[in-house]
C-alpha cells in the first residue's frame, strides 16, 4: 500500500464475509461469459468437466477479487460505494484477504489444468496476474487509462471458456475478448460520470478526474463506435449468424444513440436531472453485454439442434 | 464465570466451521466427479511411476 491505513478489527468474520471477498457479483458475470465461451465453441465437453471448469474459472476470478480488496483497502475505505466491504469494514484483516486470494489463485489454476487443459489454466493464471498485479497494484493509481487496460482482465473469461473446449485460442475467442474489452471503458466511464466525487476523494486517477467530464463524454462516444464495429463484425464470424446479427444491430443502434445523447449533454443539463441519462446508459450497458452473449449462445444452440434459419449462412 | 459460557462469537465460529466443512466436502465430490468423467472419456489411467511399466509401452516398438 502506498500509505498506511489503520482499520480497527471489530469482530470475528463470518463465512459470508470471506465469500464477499470473492466479489460474488463480478463472479456471476465471469461465470456467464466463461460459460458462453465454452458453449459456443465447436467442441463438446463432458458436462461434469464443463461445470468444474467454469467453477474453477469463477474461483480464480474470486481470488483476484480478494487480492484487489487486500491491496485497495485504503481506497475502499474512502469511497462510499465500497466502504462496507469486509476489509474496510474491519471484519477481515487485509492479510487474511491476501492469503485467501493467493491460496485460491493456486488452487483454481491447478484444478483448471486437471479438469481442462494447460492452455486454459495458463490463460487463467495470466488473467489473475493481470488483474491483481498489472491493474490493481500498478496501473489503477497511475494512469487515467486504468479502465481501458484493466478491462482486458474482465475480457479473458470467454477466451478461457473457449480454451477449455478447444485447447487453444482462435479468431472467434479473440473477437469475444475484444467485445468485452471495448465495452468496459464506456461502461465504467458512465459510472464515473455520476460517481466522480468518490474517485476524487480516493485519489484514483479516473478520466473524469484528470481530464474532466467533457473529455470523458468524447471518449465514451469513440469507444461506443469502435465497440459497435466489433459487435456487428462478430455476426459474420464462425460463431455469428442471423439471430446474433439482428440482436447486435438492434442493441448497437440503441447503445450508439444513447452515447450520442450523452455526448451532446453538458454538465449543467446532467446536474439538472441528477445524471439520469448517464445512469440509464450504465444500466443499458449491462443488458447490452448480457444480450450479446445470450445471442451467441442461442446461435450455438440452434446449430446443435440442426436448425438453419437462413439458407447458406 | 463458567468456562463453557456461550457467546455470540461462538455461533459465528460455528457457522464458519460448518461453511468450510461443506466447501471441503463439495471439493471432494468435484474431484471425484472429474475423475469419473475423465476415466469414462478414456483418459490415460496410468502414468510414470519411477519404474518400468509394460502397460505404458507403445506397442510394436
Image: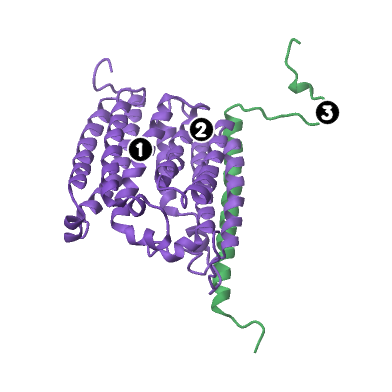
Chain colours: A purple, B green
In this rendering, the label closer to the viewer, 3 or 1: 1
Give neighbour class at mark 2: few <14, some 14-19, many 20+ (Cα, 10 Å): many
Furthest residue in direction bottom, as rendered: B1
Disc 3: host chain: B
Which label was assigned to residue A61? Answer: none
Rate crowding at label 3 as few (under 14), some (14 to 19) or many (20 or more) other CA atoms within 10 Å: few
Percent position (x, y) of residue A194? 28, 57
Mark whose residue sits in front, 1 or 2 = 1
Precedes in sequence: disc 1 or disc 2 = 2
Separation of residues labelled 3 and 1 (CA atoms): 53 Å
Q: Chain of mark 1?
A: A
Residue A182 tag number: 1
The answer to whether any part of residue A56 appears in the image is no
Q: Which residue is mark 3?
A: B51
Q: Where is residue A281 shown, x and y percent of the image?
A: 24, 48
At x 57%, y 53%, the residue is A101
In contact (CB < 8 Å): disc 2 and disc 3:
no
Amino acid at each position: 500500500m502506498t500509505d498506511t491505513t489503520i482499520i480497527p478489527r471489530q469482530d470475528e468474520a463470518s463465512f459470508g464475509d470471506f465469500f464477499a471477498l470473492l466479489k460474488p457479483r463480478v463472479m456471476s458475470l465471469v461465470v456467464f461469459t466463461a460459460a458462453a465461451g465454452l458453449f459456443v465453441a465447436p467442441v463438446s465437453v463432458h458436462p461434469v468437466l464443463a461445470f468444474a471448469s467454469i467453477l474453477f474459472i469463477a474461483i480464480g476470478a474470486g481470488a483476484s477479487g480478494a487480492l484487489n480488496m487486500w491491496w485497495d483497502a485504503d481506497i475502499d475505505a474512502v469511497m462510499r460505494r465500497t466502504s462496507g466491504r469486509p476489509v474496510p469494514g474491519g471484519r477481515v484483516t487485509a492479510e487474511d484477504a491476501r492469503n485467501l486470494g493467493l491460496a485460491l489463485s493456486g488452487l483454481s489454476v491447478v484444478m483448471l489444468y486437471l479438469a481442462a487443459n494447460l492452455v486454459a489454466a495458463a490463460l487463467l493464471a495470466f488473467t489473475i496476474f493481470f488483474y491483481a498485479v498489472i491493474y490493481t497494484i500498478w496501473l489503477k493509481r497511475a494512469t487515467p487509462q486504468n479502465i481501458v487496460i484493466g478491462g482486458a482482465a474482465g475480457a479473458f473469461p470467454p477466451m478461457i471458456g473457449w480454451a477449455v473446449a478447444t485447447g487453444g485460442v482462435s479468431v472467434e475467442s479473440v473477437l469475444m475478448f475484444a467485445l468485452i474489452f471495448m465495452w468496459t471503458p464506456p461502461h465504467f466511464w458512465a459510472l464515473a460520470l455520476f460517481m466522480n466525487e468518490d474517485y476524487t476523494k480516493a485519489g484514483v486517477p479516473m478520466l473524469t478526474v484528470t481530464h474532466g467530464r467533457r473529455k470523458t463524454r468524447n471518449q465514451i462516444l469513440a469507444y461506443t463506435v469502435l465497440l459497435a464495429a466489433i459487435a456487428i463484425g462478430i455476426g459474420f464470424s464462425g460463431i455469428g449468424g442471423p439471430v446474433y446479427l439482428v440482436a447486435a444491430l438492434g442493441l448497437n443502434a440503441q447503445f450508439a444513440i444513447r452515447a450520442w445523447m450523452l455526448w451532446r449533454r453538458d454538465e449543467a443539463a446532467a446536474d439538472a436531472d441528477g445524471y439520469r441519462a448517464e445512469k440509464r446508459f450504465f444500466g443499458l450497458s449491462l443488458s447490452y453485454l448480457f444480450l450479446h452473449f445470450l445471442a451467441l449462445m442461442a446461435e450455438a444452440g440452434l446449430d446443435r439442434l440442426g436448425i438453419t434459419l437462413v439458407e447458406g449462412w | 464465570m463458567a468456562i463453557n459460557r456461550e457467546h455470540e462469537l461462538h455461533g459465528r465460529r460455528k457457522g464458519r466451521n460448518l461453511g468450510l466443512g461443506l466447501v471441503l466436502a463439495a471439493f471432494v465430490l468435484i474431484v471425484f466427479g472429474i475423475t469419473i468423467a475423465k476415466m469414462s472419456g478414456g483418459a490415460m489411467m496410468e502414468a510414470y511411476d519411477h519404474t518400468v511399466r509394460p502397460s505404458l509401452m507403445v506397442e510394436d516398438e
